[in-house]
Amino acid sequence: MSAASGPAERGGYDLAVIGAGPAGLAAAVAAADLGLRCALLDAGPRTGGQYYRHPAPGLGATRPDRLHHGWSVYTGLADRLAAHRRTGRVDLLGGHQVWALERPADTGWAVHATLGPAADERATVRAAAVLLATGAYERQLPFPGWTLPGVVTAGGAQAMLKAGLVLPGRRIVVAGSGPLLLAAASSLVTAGAEVPEVVEATGYLGYARRPDVLAAVPAKLVEGAGHGAALLRHGVRLRRRSAVVEAHGTDRVTAVTVARLDADWRPVPGTERRIACDALAVGHGLLPQIELATELGAATRTTPDGAVALAVDARLRTTLPGLWAAGETCGVGGADLAIAEGELAAHAVAGAPAPTALLRRRARLRAFAELMAAAHRPGPGWTGWLRPDTDVCRCEEVPVARITEAVEELGAGDARTVKLLTRAGMGWCQGRMCGPAVACLSGAGESRADSRPLSCPVPLSQLAAGPPAS
């Protein structure tokens, strides 16, 4: 099949929404309600994103709502989307992994996506405006043994349960930092796993600094109380100011060592305890996925937890004309905030006045997101649980010792130089997993915006095949 016979170029859209998670789905539906013709693109075959991940169709799950918080919100948006698809107001383009944005001659946007490995499995979508709702990925801090089978991310454990209806193990320690831990642990014990402890690196005291912000989001408090009640019913202990500093095992994790942390996350000597388990779900928050915008020069901001997010104004406009953003790309804050921002961005793109109640809701939820990020910001002392032979970049198997050598003996002073000297971050994930850790070990200080010409792997045949057929 020739390149010209492949997926044709699609055009004539008022808005292309990239990402069909809570923010993107809400944005596409709201924009269609306001009269815009939209394309909704997602790498997955279905809507919902990581948050509303569906069980695989072949599993025959009859009650997917039991695995989700706020499932009725999703089904409401999905029903509205289905109605707009029937009238041709929205085209849902599943299986489209967007690798670049282009703005030719300032007349609109070209959204380039890959659909598969062959030269003709690609598409270009043209629209007057683009809304970025690409979500986030998990922040991982390495520790000895973190590459053992049975060690998964906290979000990965939830994904296994929601999509595959399976558990990563039977006795699972949940560890790291952030509200995702409570949600993951609650899901795991409800599904039948034994969770001996939830190990949280922070002390939750950061929330107490802004009682006014907490009082403005009662639903968040109810949600947290619900997770806490589930853990209490199953006898799960929440251990604060502690971290898993080593995972043990040969072919698979069989135990973890937990140590108490000081205020800077340095392990306190003599506090180590060993917990038997056959799985560990670990994560230290989420990082906005913003490469498509930063490659074009969009301005960013550093969030209170040290992550880099897109800078947007009150109407969710980025600093690039015609490019909006919503949800986690603007700073991680959860599904409720993502939905509110998606709807607000749609109003802005359509030139419609934003509902006052929606503006206030977004302000309350964004304030809570900033407070949450500050409360769970990783402390600089986490490097105290590393050993020289601990792999930092698991793709290229680069240990701490090689990074230390690059910094102390070869003069590297930032993550990019470390990458050139050690190959850390040059593997399949392109530094998405190890990037923050490498930057910290290089002494580079605050994180910098990630920039790359291709936001995901693309076959050379697609890059070389020329313009798509129209």
Image: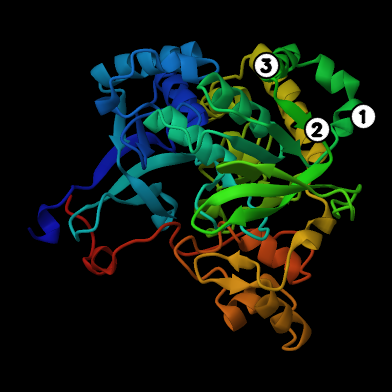
Q: Which mark is residue 223?
A: 3
Kindly indicate whether the residue at mark 3 contacts the one at mark 2 (C-beta within 8 angstroms): no
SS at mark 1 in the image: helix
Other residues around mark 1 within 10 Å, as few (<14) / some (14–19) / many (≥20)? few
Q: CA distance from mark 3 to mark 1?
A: 20 Å
Question: In percent of the image, x 15 and y 52: which residue is there?
Answer: 6
Of the 4 image quadrants, the one containing the N terminus is bottom left
Other residues around mark 2 within 10 Å, as few (<14) / some (14–19) / many (≥20)? many
Disc 1 residue type (three-letter)? Arg
The reply to whether residue 77 is visible in this rendering is no
Considering only order in the chain, which callout, 1 or 3, is on the residue closer to the N terminus? 1
Question: In percent of the image, x 29 and y 25: which residue is there?
Answer: 59
Kindly indicate whether the residue at mark 1 contacts the one at mark 2 (C-beta within 8 angstroms): yes
SS at mark 2 in the image: helix
Disc number lying in front (2 or 3) = 3
Q: Quadrant of residue 457?
A: bottom left
Q: Dot 1 corresponds to which residue?
A: 209
Q: At which x and y percent is residue 301?
A: 72, 49
Left or right of 457, for residue 142: right
Q: Nearer the viewer, residue 187 or 292?
A: 187
Number of numbered callouts drawn: 3
Question: In percent of the image, x 24 and y 17: which residue is there?
Answer: 86
Disc 3 residue type (three-letter)? Glu
Left or right of 432, for residue 455: left
Disc 2 residue type (three-letter)? Leu
Q: At which x and y percent is residue 273?
A: 78, 46
Q: At which x and y percent is residue 208?
A: 90, 26
SS at mark 3 in the image: helix
Q: Dot 2 corresponds to which residue?
A: 371
Q: Quadrant of residue 17?
A: top left
Considering only order in the chain, which callout, 1 or 2, is on the residue closer to the N terminus? 1
Q: At which x and y percent is residue 399?
A: 63, 72
